[in-house]
Image: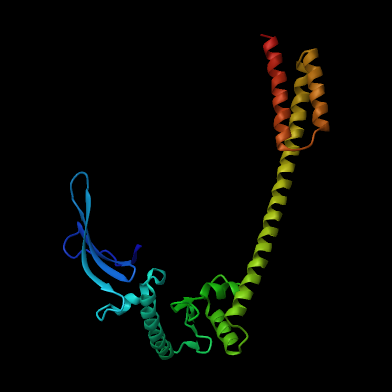
Amino acid sequence: MSRVIYRTRPFSPYAKYSKYWNEYIQEGDEIIKYVFNKVKFPDRELRNKIYSDEKQRWTIGDIDFPDWLYGYVVDSDLSDSGKKIVKQWRLEKYISDLNNYKEKGYFIDEEKKIVITDREILMFREDSEVPYWDKITSLVKEAYNRIRITPQMMELVKKDFETQTVDYEILCDMAEQNRKKNEEKEKEFLAKQQELQEKKDYEVAIQLFLRLQKNLDDIKPKLSEEGRKEIDHLLNLIDESEVSRARYDILHQAGVEIILKEKSKRG
């Protein structure tokens, strides 16, 4: 399987009609660097043509393998030996990252492998085949039922970790409880909205029924005897009918047909 794991931004070093960018393609344990060149021909058709050229190729574990590329490797595409190499790199990188976070003064829970920065909550996952930093910020926002990250919230999260009030499992439970509560609130809100809409529709339908009755009463004296009987019958149906917009449409159409029939009789 072949997939793009990293793409640089296009840049124009020579002319505005020519853009370059690099793409790093992973094929199993191999990473191939391609240089792409998009040329726009400034003629009437504004034709575009893209050229690509393989620039370099590495295998996971090569001495000259770019260190930063390990951060973009897709674990599931690797062989067992490739996974072992990436696992070792990430464990070493974890120690380096931890020292870097300490220098910046971020909150660190080494036992739970949690790091809390100004804007993110990270957890180093060693329980997977290839360990990685997992951004659990969204989970924490759900657990604390917050929409945005604020300094006050981050301080609260730090305090809860320091006092061992929360850990990853507790956060998952809190998030699940809040999801259920929010789902119930959403259902209640939608039910309320539907109730209000039905009430509004009912009130509109009542006004339509009253207007239809009035119009039929007004036009009744102008009709033939047969027409007046049909109007009386229709008025009785209106009195006995369920009040709804659908029922109004049917009764209104019946009234229109009576009037049209009267007009056709008169020629």
Q: Residue at x 74, y 47 (%)?
A: 199
Residue closer to the observer: 228 or 86: 86
Q: Position of residue 215 (x, y in %)?
A: 74, 26
Residue 209 vertical position relative to residue 16 in the rendered view, above or below: above
The total of numbered circles placed on residues is 0
Q: Tell me the colour scheme of the image.
A: rainbow
Q: Position of residue 16 (x, y in %)?
A: 20, 59
Q: Quadrant of residue 259?
A: top right
Q: Position of residue 253 (x, y in %)?
A: 69, 26
Is residue 150 among the parts visible in the rendering?
Answer: yes
Residue closer to the observer: 165 or 45: 165
Q: Residue at x 75, y 21 (%)?
A: 219
Residue found at the very far top of the displayed protein: 267
Residue 98 vertical position relative to residue 130 in the rendered view, above or below: below
Q: Residue at x 51, y 75 (%)?
A: 137
Is residue 144 among the parts visible in the rendering?
Answer: no
Q: Residue at x 54, y 81 (%)?
A: 154
Residue 237 vertical position relative to residue 178 in the rendered view, above or below: above
11 sits left or right of 27 in the view: left
The quarter in which the C terminus is drawn is: top right
193 sits left or right of 233 in the view: left
Q: Quadrant of residue 62?
A: bottom left
Q: Quadrant of residue 183?
A: bottom right
Q: Position of residue 201 (x, y in %)?
A: 71, 43
Residue found at the very far left of the displayed protein: 14
The quarter in which the N terminus is drawn is: bottom left
